[in-house]
Structures are given as C-alpha cells and as structure tokens.
Amino acid sequence: MTSQISPIQDSCPSGEISAYIDGELSPVEEIEVESHFGVCIICSTELNRQKSFLSALSSSLEREKEFELPKNFTKTIVANAESRVSGLRRPRERFNAVFICTALFLFILFALGSDAETLFGIFVVVLEKAAAVGAFAFRLVYSVSLGAVVVARSLSSQILFSSYLSFLFFAGLFGFLLFACSRLILRSDRS
Ligand SMILES: [Zn+2]
C-alpha cells in the first residue's frame, strides 16, 4: 500500500536535498533528484523550505555585517567615564556621599537597637570576666555585620550607592567602627 500523502517514502532522497542545494551532487544524481521533485510534493516542499531558510539566514548575516560600531565609540565611552569620575569631585556629590554614609551608620545603630540591651549585659560580664572577651567580640562583630547586611539589603532596592567612592567611604567607616569597638574591649579588659 503506497500513498502520495504519506510523509517520507522509501524512494525519497530526503538526505540529498541539502546536498542538492549545496551543489554537492554529481550531475547524474542531480537529474535524478530534480525529476523526483517533479513528482513528490513532500520533497519539493522540503526543498523550498530549506531554500527559504537559507536565504533568510544569509540575508540576516548580511545585515549583521552592515552593523558596525560607530567610529568614535571608544572615544565616547572614555569621555563619558571621565566625566563621571570628575563629577565625583563636585562638592554636591561629596555631600551626597557623606549624607548617605551617615544615614547608613545611623541605620546600623538602629538595626542593632533591639540587641543593644543584650550587648550591654554581655559587656558588663566581659568587664568581670576577661575570658568572655572573645565571645563578646565575636558576638559584637556578628551583630554589627548582621546589621550591616540587613541595612544594605533593605537599602539596596531604595538607595543606590551614588558612586563607588561613597561605597568605599562606607566600608572604611564600618571598618573603623569595628576597630574602635575592639580597642574599647581591649582597654576595658586591661583596667
Ligand atoms: Zn519525495
């Protein structure tokens, strides 16, 4: 039982269609395939499909070639970056950076607020027992770090760091805070 409608018949040179388009067949094979296209609607449809796909592909590749970077592309990028960096030196930008950093510092203190009483209680114990210093320091650093993370997370969606500089400033401030706390602990330990 043979039918014209069945998808691919055994006699169909389905694997040779792309070879035919690429011109890889021998003249005899080409004639055979062409005569088959005349009688088989499935293979002639497949031939047209592959041809139109290839022409679409080549035309899109042509368009790709036409797209070139503007001649002054790099120059523009560099000039833009330079103007951004020099913009940081403006007093207003500095003020913004300091303002944001101060706000962040206050937010850290606020975030620690609920823990402050506990921390103070531990602090008293530390004064009596030097052995607890390590644990306290760890707890303090942990709490401050946790506070910083909470603050950073809650702020990241609302306040964008206006610049890399302000981030460095904040990081330095945070480091100084940790340093100052550690000095405080060591001094009270000695006395
Ligand atoms: Zn066929």
Image (cartoon, rainbow, N blue to C red):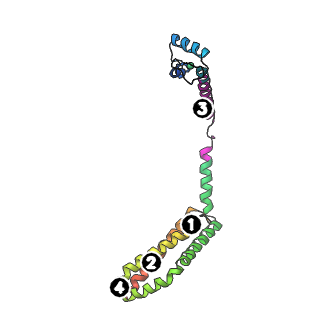
Q: Main secondary structure of the magenta part?
A: helix
Which residue is disc 2 drawn over? 140
Residue at (61% x, 57% y) in the render: 84
Q: Quadrant of the rendered structure where residue 46 is? A: top right
Respond yes or no on whether mark 2 lies under 8 Å from ligand 1: no
Residue at (53% x, 70% y) in the render: 150
Which residue is disc 1 drawn over? 166
Which residue is disc 3 drawn over? 61
Residue 173 visible in the displayed image: no
What are the residue bounds of the magenta stretch? 46-75
Q: Mark 2: which amino acid?
A: Leu
Q: Earlier in the sequence, mark 1 or mark 3?
A: 3
Residue at (60% x, 70% y) in the render: 100
Which residue is disc 4 drawn over? 130
Q: Is residue 35 magenta?
A: no
Respond yes or no on whether mark 3 lies under 8 Å from ligand 1: no
Q: Which residue is most to the top?
A: 28
Q: Is residue 158 above or below residue 33?
A: below
Q: Is residue 146 above or below residue 33?
A: below
- In-image side of 133 versus 12 (left or right): left
Q: Earlier in the sequence, mark 3 or mark 4?
A: 3
